[in-house]
Amino acid sequence: MDQNLVKREQWSSKLGFIFAAVGSAVGLGNLWGFAYRSSQGGGAAFVILYILVVLIICIPVFVAEFSLGRNTSTSAFLAPIKAAGQNWAPLGWLFLVAPLAIASYYSVIMGWTIDMFFHILFNKLPANKEEADQLFNLLSGGNRDMIGQILSLFLGGLIISAGIKKGIEKINKICMPLLFFLLFSLVVWAAFLNNALEGYYNFILNFDLSQLFDPDNIKNAFSQAFFSLSLGIGIMVTYSSYLNKKSDLPKQSFQIASLDTLVGLMAGLITFPIMFTFGFGSSFDGDPIGALFKYIPTGLGDYGLAGRIVAILFFGLIYIAAITSLISLLEIPVSTLKDKFNFDRKKATFFTIIFTFLIGIPSAINAGFIGKIDAIANILLILGGFLVSFLLAWVVPKTLDDELINSGSSLITRNYLKFMLKYITPILISAGLLVTIKQTLIQWVGN
Ligand code: TRP
């Protein structure tokens, strides 16, 4: 592979890489999925399971993905082959197909978000649930949402085609601080709502021990953790392929996972007070996707101009979070086309967004389709997480070791991560994978 003849672009600094990885991680999954899943699974029990999955499973997987990416310095599609030979080509395919599948519906939801943003910028918020239903049907039905979908893909393509430093890194350096600022302001605002305390109680304090063992809850925690951290399908492989040899991978994994979890928690501290103050009760009753687009604007409608401003900020925030995630998804096929077929970045981006648009059409036409691919994508993420850990710990342990030594990790950290990746992580992920597949099938048959 002659891509090594041309010097591979790199992040300009450690911080640039962290911003980009956090930008990928923080997205719709945190702002919507975290609160939604916790509302299904008895609050605190979900949050505890989620944090356990992140600490025990995801951080080692992060290190595995980062080691693979940095060591091979190639796109996620080629990295498994370069590390372990042709037998591992299927993992490369998984790394290519899964991000495309996610990007296909992610861009559709972003289309609704931007549409909602402009709608409330110029119009009043819906006054009641009926009006909210109508509005959501308008945004998500038929051809109209394809405009937002195309716009989002085009915007993502524009950023990506500018390259790693000038495109991806730059946009994240602007968006991430802005996002934290907006998020923090909204958390403070929500704390003053009438039923904020009741919201907090249901989110993090309401603890039911039996929920810790509930299979749906376990599935939710696994899916949420892998999705929210952008783990398991090569994003982190790709981003770390632009990393210099010295940065401390375990430390950065921990930092990225912590920031991402913090955002999920903060989003809960906004949505739960809103839900309880405006009487939507403790659950998004079975309408996960619409929830964000119906309840929040309707609730805020009671607050006049202030409510409208908050709603505008909220949807702006979601869009900013989502665009930095979308570009990470698109970067996988783009870097694959570059590395494998020597396309230049612009041409690779062009093909990627056209293809993503086409495979996103079913999601744009039928919102019900989104839930289905999302469920499949979540299974692929967990499967990918398993395979990456297995690859690094059992097939190419030297690569893992080298990267940990390059990172300057202490002996304890190195041994801990190697032990986890060899013996603990694969077993726990397999268990999580089986539960997730089983519960997904039960849900499908049940419907
Ligand atoms: N993590 C992002 C979110 O929470 C979505 C995302 C971006 C993603 N890249 C990913 C999910 C890779 C899984 C894998 O919204």
Image: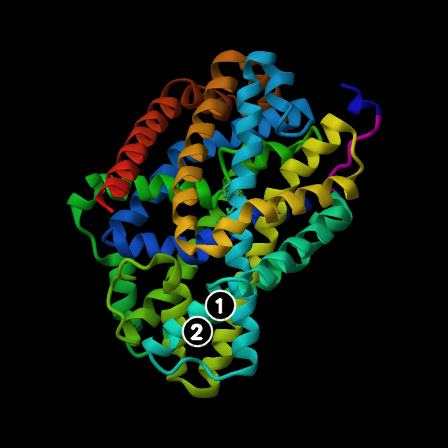
Total numbered badges shown on the rendered structure: 2
Pick the front one: 137 or 36:
137
**Residue at the (51%, 79%) spot, across then down:** 309
Residue labelled with disc 2: 135
Pick the front one: 432 or 295:
295
Q: Is residue 243 left or right of residue 100?
A: right
Mark 2 crowd level (few <14, some 14–19, many ≥20, 10 Å Cα) = some
The quadrant of the rendering that contains the N terminus is top right
Q: Is residue 165 left or right of residue 269?
A: right
* Residue 260 x, y percent position in the rendering: 48, 49
- Callout 1: SS: helix
Q: Are the two marked residues, 2 and 1, in contact with CB atoms closer than 8 angstroms?
A: yes
* Cα–Cα span, label 2 and label 1: 6 Å
Q: Specify the segment rendered in magenta.
A: 6-11
Asked whether residue 242 is in view, the answer is no
Q: Based on the displayed image, in which of its 4 quarters is residue 300 positioned? A: bottom left
Q: Is residue 121 left or right of residue 168?
A: left
Q: Residue furthest bottom?
A: 304
Mark 1 crowd level (few <14, some 14–19, many ≥20, 10 Å Cα) = many
Q: In the rendered view, would you say 413 is above or below 127?
A: above
Q: Main secondary structure of the magenta part?
A: loop
